[in-house]
Structure formats: C-alpha cells, structure tokens
Image (spheres, rainbow, N blue to C red):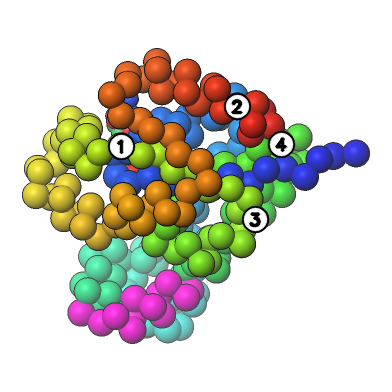
Amino acid sequence: MTHKPLRLGLTGGIGSGKSTVAGFLADAGAAILDADAVSRSLTQAGGRAIPAVLATFGETLLTPEGALNRDAMRNLVFSNPDSKRQLESIIHPLVSLVLQEQAQMAVQQGKTCLVFDVPLLVEGIERWRPQLDKICVVDCLPETQIQRVMARNQLSRPEIERIMAQQATRQQRLACADLVILNEGIDLAQLQHKVREMWASFGL
Ligand code: ATP
C-alpha cells in the first residue's frame, strides 16, 4: 500500500535561495520537478510546444533550427499582451502535463515528497494551487536578494531591480505561503539545518 505523496510547491524571488533549498531537499530524497527546465525543454527544437507555436505565430517566432526564438518572443510579448497570453496558453498546460508525468514516474520510483520548483508560482497562483498540497516560500530581504545575485551573476543593481520589479512582491509571496523558510542572517550550513528540521513534516 503506497501513501499519497506530498506535492510541495517551492518558490521564492530571484536570489532568495530557492535552488539551494531544493538541493537540500533532493539530498533528503525528495524528487525535484523543475518547471523552468521543463519550459525550456518544451521550447527547444523538436520540443512539444513547438508545433502549436508554429501554428499560432508562424515561423517568425522560431530560430532556423526550429527552437523558440527568445529574442523575437520577448519583443513580441513586450509589444503585444495578447500574444503573451496566447503563448502562455500554449506553454503553461504543457508544463503542468510534463510535470505530472515526471511526478508519476517519481512516485513509481518510491518518492514520497515531490518538490515542484516553480520560480513564478505566485504569479500563476490560481493555476498552481490545485496542483499542490502545500506552498513553501523561501524568503529574505530584497536587499539580500540583490547582494546574492550581484555576487553570483555579476549583474548590476539596476538589472536585478528590474527583474525583481517584474516578479511578485515579498508580501504577495508570503500571502500564498503555507510554510516559510526565512533565509536571512544565516549561512548555508544554518539554512541546511533549517531545511533538515522540516524534513520530517515533508515525509522524508
Ligand atoms: P534564482 O531564482 O535566481 O535561481 P534562487 O532563489 O534559486 O535564485 P539560489 O541560487 O539558491 O537562489 O541562491 C542565490 C545565491 O545565494 C547562490 O549563490 C547561493 O549559494 C547563495 N545563498 C543562498 N542562501 C545563502 C545563505 N544563507 N548564505 C550564503 N549564501 C547563500
């Protein structure tokens, strides 16, 4: 008799430490299902989203190799909100479908905790909520996000602030959280300790 696995949504703003927490959960035996990686694979040449992108937008949105042309896409969605919605209506259901397939495989392999790593979970909360049992937000001060990303990517402060302005606010994320991991004023070892403390409640 297998238990129903826990479907945990993991999110946080850029630089919050979400990927680091996902890594600690993977060490503990959780399956990590990465929404961004799935989205990228769907839009590579031969990806499952490409036929619908071609049918809807024509070849202008594809590279010569047949992948989604990200520059062309950015220009289009920036100038035309309807196109953004159309593109999302192609990609989002496919991301959910592929994640469900991956989740099923993980359960067959005996995983009891499925971590859905979704950077923009809160931005799509109505779509994600029914697919998850609990939402865990990795949280820190906005200034800490900036410092971490500047150290990691060599991006400038204005570039990071621009990305943060496009994401949900800290308050919006916290309002969606069932669990909060405060990744502030602690080092990586202390973060790992915090995540370990939560393992038992995640069924790991
Ligand atoms: P993104 O959304 O940009 O992928 P993220 O939320 O996944 O970011 P991480 O990549 O996990 O964030 O962390 C950002 C950077 O900050 C990494 O270099 C990570 O090692 C570092 N970091 C995270 N938490 C801590 C911490 N408590 N102490 C020191 N460094 C940390």
Residue under numbered circle 4 = 112
Q: Is residue 80 above or below residue 92?
A: below
The label number, if any, that marks residue 140 in the structure image: 1
Under circle 1, the secondary element is loop
The picture places residue 144, in percent across and down from the top left corner, at: 22, 34
Kind of residue sitting beneath label 3: Gln
Q: Are marks 2 and 1 in contact (CB under 8 Å)?
A: no
**Residue 60 seen:** no
Tell me which numbered mark, 3 or 1, is placed earlier along the sequence.
3
- Quadrant holding the C terminus: top right
Q: Is 86 rendered above or below residue 156?
A: below
Q: Which mark is residue 100?
A: 3
> Which is nearer the N-term, disc 1 or disc 4?
4
Question: Is residue 99 visible from the viewing direction of this image?
Answer: yes
Q: Which residue is mark 2?
A: 199
Q: Is residue 39 magenta?
A: no
Q: Which residues are magenta?
A: 79-90
